[in-house]
Amino acid sequence: AFKGGGPPSSVSVKIMVQQVNLYGPEIYVHHLPEVVENTNAHVYAIVRVIDRDLGINGEIQGLEIVDGDPSGHFRVRKNKVISGGKSSEFTIEILKPLDRRVAPSGYNLTLRAVDKGKPPRQTYMFTSISLVYVNDNAPVFDREIYEVEVPESAPVNSPIIRLKVTDADQGKNAQVFLEIVGGNEGGEFYVNPDTGMLYTVVTLDAEVKNLYTLTVSAVDQGNIGSRKQSSAKVKIQVMDVNDNNPLFDVDKLEAYVSENESAGTSVVKVTARDKDSGENGYISYS
């Protein structure tokens, strides 16, 4: 500084640069895609919160759930502080069993992160939790044993009987797949896995086999490892039809009779056979 013609003078000025809380916290959530109801899982998500400010303005004060959980099914727990407080890791834990019947749409949590700046900045994030029904019911047939009669003249692909199966679960846990697992070694029958209708695959022959006992399995389509199964028996009686002609044991027979034989004398014995069964196999001679 100068005054008149005198010598210059100077003074020291100290300028203090005060840090300003420029940035709010940033929230990153790594969570399960869905949660099975009544699960034993303890941790739903790992949350990392960072702040790009320097000093105390960049330190994380906390993370909390501020909406979407009125019954207290979840809690936030701080795990560790990273990079001198500029980054913190939290977990969202499941405290109570989750029931999809109570919350069919799942849960929509609102998270709030706050830094230590003055004044503090805060950031909100929404995270959705989808619930999946637990597979706690096995498929149930409406009968343990089915009994049905089929004529051996039934054409190939003839419907025989519809097997009715129900499952008290929801969604894919209630979807049932049917399969013949026993008694069908020759591949004579087929069951539609979705409708439960049982069909013939070949022409049946009561003279070859007149009774089949099938074992049909029903498996639900829950997640692998949780699928449930049940089974039922199907007894199929193949009914004979009169589809065979009687046949003599020999095609041609010659017999000789003395001219003086009295009436009623036995001349020759002939035998015929019929491959049909029951009354259809009974033979009369004339």
Image (cartoon, rainbow, N blue to C red):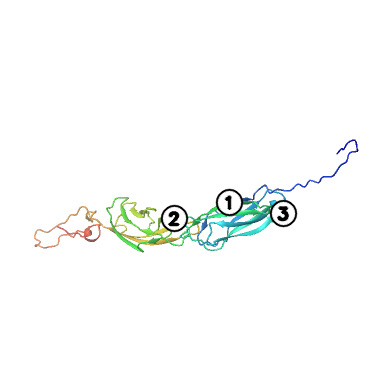
The image quadrant where one finds the C terminus is bottom left
User: Distance between the Cα atoms at labels 1 and 3?
Assistant: 24 Å
On residue 171, the disc is 2
Give the image location of residue 48, x and y in percent: 63, 53
In the image, 230 versus 33, the foreground residue is 33
The 10 Å Cα crowd at callout 2, few under 14, some 14 to 19, many 20 or more, is few
> Which residue is the extreme one toward the top?
5
Residue at the location (45% across, 55% down)? 172
In the image, 48 versus 9, the foreground residue is 9
- Mark 1 vs mark 3: give the one in front: 1
Q: Which residue is mark 3?
A: 84
Kind of residue at disc 1: Met
- Mark 1 vs mark 2: give the one in front: 1
Instruction: Please tell me whether mark 3 sits on a helix, a strand or a loop.
Output: helix
Residue at the location (62% across, 54% down)? 113
Q: Which residue is mark 1?
A: 125
Instruction: Please tell me whether mark 2 sits on a helix, a strand or a loop.
Output: helix
Give the image location of residue 20, x and y in percent: 70, 48
Left or right of 250? Residue 164 is right
Instruction: Please tell me whether mark 1 sits on a helix, a strand or a loop.
Output: strand
Kind of residue at disc 2: Gly
Find out whether the residues at labels 1 and 2 contact each other: C-beta distance under 8 Å. Answer: no
Give the image location of residue 13, x and y in percent: 82, 45
User: Distance between the Cα atoms at labels 2 and 3?
Assistant: 48 Å
